[in-house]
Amino acid sequence: MMALVHSNDYEKHETGNHPESKERIRVIIDTLEKEGILNRIKSESPYHGSDFELSGKVDLFSPKMASHDDILRVHTESYIEYLKSFCSSGGGYLDFDTVASEESYSIAKLAAGGAITASDLVLNNYTSAYSLARPPGHHATREKAMGFCLFNNVAVAIEYLKKFSELKKFMIFDFDAHYGNGTAEIFINDPNVLYISIHQDPHTIFPGNGFVEEIGVGEGMGFNMNIPMPPGSSNHDYMYILERLLEPVAHDFGADFYFLEVGFDAHKDDPLSGIMLDDEFYPWITSKMMEIAGKMVLIFEGGYDLAALSRCNMKMINVLRDELNVDGGEIYKSRIKEKNVSDETKKIFYSIQDVFSSFYEF
């Protein structure tokens, strides 16, 4: 049973002529509406049980607003107040590429609240819940907006779960083309949060970090795993390395709860990266993660080609609603041709294996 958490209010985060535009989520919702798969839930409560379930449908919920305390568990008071004041004064550019408008402060709280709402849904009956929200979050640090991100949505959800549930250990897998530097930094010394990111080589793309050697700090050493991929990497490269890493590392860590940060900017049609994934990667990785996790929250991050966003989200969601059964990715794994895997990809795998040999067996 799948839930989608979304609000049309996310369009009130106005960015103008900018890659991170309101059209990104509008095209996804329009596609789902056209396919007729949304089941609009009247109740705002995620605890309604299964009475509303319709076969093959996706239950659509409105997000609750994250509270000030929810945000404060992750971000500094000074940054929260700065962003609030900046937006109330009309907004503008927070840095060279991150935009906030007059309503962006409250909409960023709503996006963080979407991640919380999705987490509550997975805690109560749903096997998956997708927070389709903007602004995105994984570049936002404790005290700074960057990379189109204002509040770190996944971090807000994790700290909420730490506070209000008995869950102790969390795994995040992030396949956005850009390293989630904010998420990594927030949990850099936390041994109870495993952050795995596969992204384009930081030598060639924003934010410029996310190298194999960045493994965590102090008690958090071994819980930050980076897989930096060279531009031009294909499905074969990604599947080769993820087949060898994800399941054994996840098994050794033993998370109580799983997050999938979904970015579609590694698609070959996307203008903001040089990775060359095609549509078939997204149902494969969704199935692979569901096989590992059993239940998970998905959080929308990047992806800037509207046609690719529409197609790939539909394929991903069809896996989650059991309309596209790829059996843990087996149907796609058979397509991995080692002759099409670059030598550089194999070197990256061996490097990660060496660096993490004292932490995991794979």
Image (cartoon, rainbow, N blue to C red):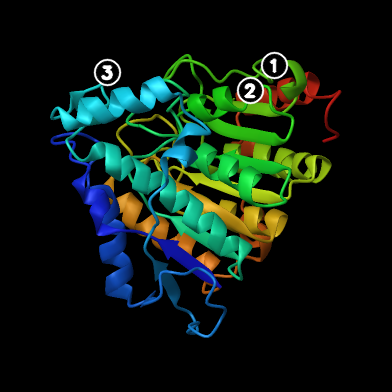
Nearer to me, 162 or 22 = 162
- Rendered position, 230 above or below 113: above
Percent coordinates x, y for residue 340 in the rendering: 59, 38
Q: Amino acid at mark 1?
A: Val
N-terminal of the two: label 1 or label 3? 3
Kindly identify which residue carries mark 2.
188
* Mark 1 to mark 3 CA distance (whole Å): 28 Å
Q: Amino acid at mark 3?
A: Asp
- Rendered position, 188 above or below 133: above
> Does residue 288 appear anywhere in the picture?
yes
Q: Name which quarter of the figure residue 44 lies in.
A: bottom left
Q: Is residue 357 left or right of residue 21?
A: right
Kindly identify which residue carries mark 1.
217
CB of mark 3 within 8 Å of CB of mark 2? Answer: no
* Mark 2 to mark 1 CA distance (whole Å): 6 Å
Percent coordinates x, y for residue 297 in the rendering: 55, 54
Kindly identify which residue carries mark 3.
95
Nearer to me, 277 or 318 = 318
CB of mark 2 within 8 Å of CB of mark 1? Answer: yes
- Label 1 residue SS: loop
Seen at 41% across and 55% down, the residue is 312
Q: Is residue 358 left or right of residue 264?
A: right
